Image: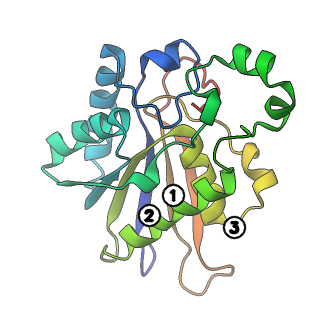
């Protein structure tokens, strides 16, 4: 641990029906499947051993249900922040990736829905939540953020100071997998955040595209 030593776990929600069907979820409010509930409970049991000091979640049901599994084990209250929502997909929401590619081939090639949300805006709002929540932590404490695959990746890219074009070098997150970041040690340059783990705790099935 460093002198400050604050850490953040960015945790993707459990499986939903639209994950199974490979549909772009975005802001559409889809609950966990029974499998997703079980994933959340399994992951929460592992995360609880880290003794988090705070939990903050997206306001969408799939993330709130995931965070609730950890809250039930730790007794912590869960703060809800809509800035942790998944990237809005506009007219892509509810479509499978094959359907998106067929209907919007040019936008698909750029992975940028014309009436959706820009990834830079997503990264900034997610990073803003992390900055705000970490400021309330004491040295050595851990924050758990329950959010969504693409939102987490864009948030990590922003926190690391990477150019948006490099964000896709961060692989997707499996359902209920997480990434771990901490503050760089005092005196190190550049100051800020570093990525310690990515897609930790992932389940055996492959991580599919998480922009859903």
Residue at point 54% right, 48% down? 152
Q: Dot 2, crowdedness within 10 Å: few (<14), some or many (≥20)? A: some
Most extreme residue toward the bottom is 187
- SS at mark 2? helix
- Closer to the chain start, of discs 3 and 1, is 1
* Location of the N terminus (image quadrant): bottom left
Q: With respect to residue 153, does 28 lie above or below? A: above
Residue appearing at x 61%, y 47% in the figure? 153
Q: Residue 4 location in percent, x, y? A: 42, 79
In the image, residue 62 lies at what x, y percent? 36, 32
Residue 141: x percent and y percent?
Answer: 32, 67
Q: Is residue 93 above or below residue 102?
A: below
Q: Considering depth in this image, is 191 or 96 the residue closer to the camera?
A: 96
Task: Relative to 6, say whether 187 is above or below.
Answer: below
Taking depth in this image into account, of 108 and 78 the one nearest to the observer is 108
The answer to whether residue 108 is left or right of residue 26 is: right
Q: Is residue 38 above or below residue 151?
A: above
Circle 2 sits on which residue? 129
Image marks 1 and 2: residues in contact by CB distance under 8 Å = yes
Q: Nearer the viewer, residue 186 or 54?
A: 54
Crowding around mark 1 (Cα neighbors within 10 Å: few <14, some 14 to 19, many 20+) is many
Real-space Cα separation, disc 1 to disc 2, in angstroms? 5 Å
State the residue position of label 1. 126
Residue linked to disc 3 = 161
Occupied quadrant, residue 47: top left
The reply to whether dot 3 and dot 2 touch (C-beta < 8 Å) is: no
Q: Please tell me the numbered disc located at residue 10.
A: none
Mark toward the start of the polypeptide (3 vs 2): 2
């Amino acid at each position: 641990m460093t002198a400050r030593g604050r850490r953040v776990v960015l945790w993707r929600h459990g499986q939903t029906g639209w994950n199974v069907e490979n549909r772009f979820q975005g802001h559409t409010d889809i609950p966990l499947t029974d499998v997703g509930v079980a994933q959340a409970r399994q992951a929460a049991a592992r995360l609880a051993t880290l003794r988090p000091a705070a939990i903050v979640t997206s306001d969408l049901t799939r993330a709130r249900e995931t965070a609730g599994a950890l809250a039930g084990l730790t007794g912590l209250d869960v703060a809800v922040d809509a800035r942790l929502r998944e990237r809005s997909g506009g007219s892509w929401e509810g479509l499978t990736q094959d359907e998106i590619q067929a209907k919007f081939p040019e936008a698909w090639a750029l992975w940028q829905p014309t009436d959706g949300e820009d990834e830079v805006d997503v990264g900034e709002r997610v990073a803003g939540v992390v900055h705000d929540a970490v400021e309330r932590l004491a040295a050595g404490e851990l924050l758990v953020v329950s959010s969504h695959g693409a939102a987490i990746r864009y948030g990590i890219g922003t926190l690391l100071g990477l150019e948006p074009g490099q964000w896709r070098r961060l692989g997707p997150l499996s359902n209920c997998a997480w990434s771990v970041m901490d503050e760089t040690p005092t005196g190190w340059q550049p100051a800020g955040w570093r990525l310690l783990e990515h897609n930790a705790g992932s389940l055996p099935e492959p991580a599919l595209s998480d922009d859903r």
